[in-house]
Image (cartoon, rainbow, N blue to C red):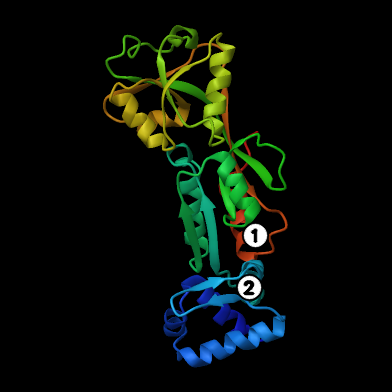
Amino acid sequence: MEIRWVEAFLAVAEELHFGRAAARLRMAQSPLSQTIRRLERELGTTLFDRSTRSVALTPAGHAFLPHAYRVFEELELGRQATRASDGVVYGTVSIGFSGALNHHTLSPLTRAVRQRFPGVTLALTGRVMTREGVEQVERGSLDIAFVGLPIDPSPVRTRLVASEPLGVVLPVDHPLAGEPDIDLADLADEGFVTTPEAGGSALQQAAMRACVHAGFRPRVVQEVTDAFLILTLVSAGVGIALMATSIAEITPTGAVFVPLRGESTCMHHGIAWLADNPSPVLSAVLDVAHEVLPSPG
């Protein structure tokens, strides 16, 4: 089996059209069809259902697809390893984060990586909540995810990078907006804007724990995945929100951040990655993370 056969298979599998796949590979359609037939003979099975109008993967084609991708992933890892042996780090690391909650942790990491390893590309994906981030790291679609800790049992490794108490974001015209601090129990009748429970949000779980500890279950009036949008909805008077203390620095006009009185519930920020990921560039980025985002305490 030749690498170019696998490359041809992936082009057809992604385009589901021999003409477009041939154009993408800069070859004529007839040699491409011959290449696919050679691969099918090598594997002893048909990879595509062909007709005059459509091309579709067969069950065997679907089964072969992830292994074909892995061939090229391994080639890329090999290229990275040879560069790393010469002291050069290059490649791509994909990072998932939730948004506003990571503005104290994501920025130092990305700045440090770009300064130290200009050949490294960081592919950033926002609005990734904890459960989704862990699942994507497990699947390999993310290399690193910023998550809330603790997480459910998982093969991923995690490390604490920051802890901060929760406070409350109120509309600027709220009767308690001018207080130096607030007893959370005084907000039991308020409507709360939160991240979705179904998304596995660590912020939502921490907020729920704080409210239950204060003697009530919050009445949720709106769920949104974007923490910036939560702040916007609070400033619009839709409800109030429990957020990490660092949000105070970026609270928009129309809203105020007020600390909570008494024993605090903390939001624990961490990073998650697969320990058996062999990528040298991931290892380099994790080393930088250990330097610029040391575990507190």
**Quadrant location of the C terminus in the rendered image:** top right
Q: List the residue tagged with mark 1.
A: 283
Tell me where residue 263 sits by quadrant. Answer: top right
At horizontal 59% and vertical 13% (from top left) the residue drawn is 213
Secondary structure at badge 1 equals helix
Res. 243 mark:
none
Q: List the residue tagged with mark 2.
A: 68
Residue 98 position within the rendered picture, expressed as x and y whole percent measured from the top left: 48, 41
> Foreground residue, 279 or 217?
217
Tell me where residue 84 sits by quadrant. Answer: bottom right
Estimate the spatial distance between the alpha carbons at disc 2 and disc 1, rounded to whole Å.
24 Å
Marks 2,1: beta carbons within 8 A: no
Secondary structure at badge 2 equals helix
Tell me where residue 160 sits by quadrant. Answer: top right
What's the residue type where badge 2 is placed?
A: Ala
At horizontal 55% and vertical 18% (from top left) the residue drawn is 210
Residue 12 position within the rendered picture, expressed as x and y whole percent measured from the top left: 51, 77
Does residue 118 sit above or below 36 in this rendering? Answer: above
**Quadrant location of the N terminus in the rendered image:** bottom right
What's the residue type where badge 1 is placed?
A: Ser
The answer to which of marks 2 and 1 sits earlier in the sequence is 2
> Foreground residue, 13 or 277?
13
Q: Residues within 10 Å of mark 2 (few under 14, many from 20)?
A: some
At horizontal 47% and vertical 54% (from top left) the residue drawn is 124
Residue 251 visible in the current orientation? no
Drawn side of residue 239 relative to residue 39, left or right: left
Drawn side of residue 106 relative to residue 278, left or right: left
- Most distant residue in the front direction: 52
Residue 236 position within the rendered picture, expressed as x and y whole percent measured from the top left: 28, 25
Q: Which mark is nearer the camera, 2 or 1?
A: 2
Residue 288 position within the rendered picture, expressed as x and y whole percent measured from the top left: 58, 54
At horizontal 35% and vertical 10% (from top left) the residue drawn is 176
